[in-house]
Image: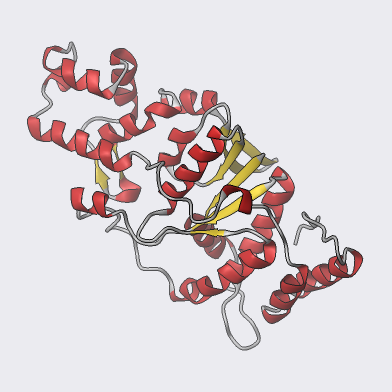
């Protein structure tokens, strides 16, 4: 079993900004839809997963907001041209055969983490398509992160994360608790960067031991952590830790990829993706009754 989990918000934004300002003859924007179609078809062809899910936010985690009211408050308003396309993204997912995963009032990261934990317990392999630093904490011998590069794609693994960040994946939340995460508007400890934080964690073995030994540490910077800073570190650790126990909105075995070529053809005509519409119609005619799961195309 190979499960692909896609961070929907990240890829929607990425596709929107990566593509020129495409629109239909009626003036409706379609650049995010086109970009998503291209990237997801490529991803499926690259990875050949047996199961897949498109994870979406349904609000912010109430516990994180209670801990830090400024959590993610620095994010700009969504562009209107992207917002206008989001409702149609779910139609695209249905056509591509990728179930949408959403839990009421929860964040996509926690949904992905919960599916990852469950799939690993079932003996499966999980590939996470995301850029979120928090998600690196899930990487293990059975979990990797999909990265597109000039050679095609690459799966980010444990040794690479350890080499880049100075700590193994499981300690990424401890590292972020010290240095913060500007993407989510989580402030770290002033003057403590990634290299210093990683050195501390390697030396003490855990964040808990680091804080326990701080008063008598050799490092003056560590000795001088104030009570307020210690409380912030503990708060940050609670915020960056992923939740892996959310109820799964779709059973794991229901995440089988079931593309609907007829729906693809209809959508691609509607959005005026002429080449893609022709390809979908050709595949539908050739594979009627047994559709091609991963149609080969550069779109």
Q: Residue lying furthest bottom in this view?
A: 26
Q: Residue at coordinates 58% horizontally, 53% vertically from top-left? A: 53
- Residue 189 visible from this viewpoint: no
Q: Nearer the viewer, residue 193 or 8?
A: 8
Q: How is the image coloured?
A: secondary structure
Residue at the image position 77 percent from the left and 75 percent from the top: 274
Dividing the image into 4 quarters, which one contains the C terminus?
bottom right
Q: Is residue 97 left or right of residue 116?
A: right
Q: Is residue 25 left or right of residue 170?
A: right
Left or right of 11 on screen, residue 275: right
99 above or below 89? above
Residue drawn where x is 56% and y is 39% of the image: 119
Task: Give the residue displayed 11% in from the left and 23% down from the top.
Answer: 224
Q: Position of residue 218 (x, y in %)?
A: 18, 11
Does the image show residue 14?
Answer: yes
**Residue at far left of view:** 227
Q: Could you say which is closer to the camera, residue 73 or residue 241?
A: 241
Q: Name the image quarter holding residue 295.
A: bottom right
Q: Is residue 108 above or below residue 160?
A: below
User: Percent position (x, y) of residue 60?
Assistant: 32, 57
């Amino acid at each position: 079993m190979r499960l692909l989990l896609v961070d929907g918000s990240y890829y929607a934004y990425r596709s929107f900004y990566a593509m020129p300002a495409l629109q239909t003859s009626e003036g409706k924007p379609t650049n995010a839809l086109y970009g998503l179609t291209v990237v997801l078809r490529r991803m499926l062809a690259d990875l050949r997963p047996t199961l897949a899910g498109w994870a979406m936010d349904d609000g912010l985690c109430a516990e994180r907001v209670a801990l830090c009211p400024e959590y993610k408050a620095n994010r700009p308003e969504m562009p209107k041209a992207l917002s206008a396309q989001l409702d149609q993204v779910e139609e695209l997912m249905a056509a591509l055969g990728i179930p949408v995963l959403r839990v009421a009032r929860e964040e996509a990261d926690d949904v992905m983490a919960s599916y990852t934990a469950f799939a690993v317990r079932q003996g499966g392999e999980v590939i996470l398509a995301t850029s979120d630093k928090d998600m690196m904490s899930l990487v293990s011998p059975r979990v990797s992160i999909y990265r597109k590069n000039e050679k095609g794609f690459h799966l980010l693994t444990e040794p690479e994360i350890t080499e880049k960040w100075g700590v193994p994946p499981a300690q990424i939340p401890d590292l972020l608790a010290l240095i913060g995460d500007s993407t989510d508007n989580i402030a770290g400890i002033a003057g403590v960067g990634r290299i210093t934080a990683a050195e501390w964690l390697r030396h003490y073995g855990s964040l808990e031991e680091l804080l326990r030994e701080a008063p008598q540490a050799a490092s003056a910077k560590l000795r001088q952590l104030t009570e307020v800073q210690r409380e912030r570190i503990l708060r940050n650790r609670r915020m960056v830790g992923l939740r892996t126990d959310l109820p799964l909105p779709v059973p794991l075995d229901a995440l089988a990829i079931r593309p609907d070529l007829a729906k693809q053809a209809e959508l691609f005509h509607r959005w005026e993706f002429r080449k893609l519409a022709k390809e979908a119609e050709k595949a539908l005619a050739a594979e009627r009754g047994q559709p091609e799961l991963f149609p080969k195309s550069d779109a």
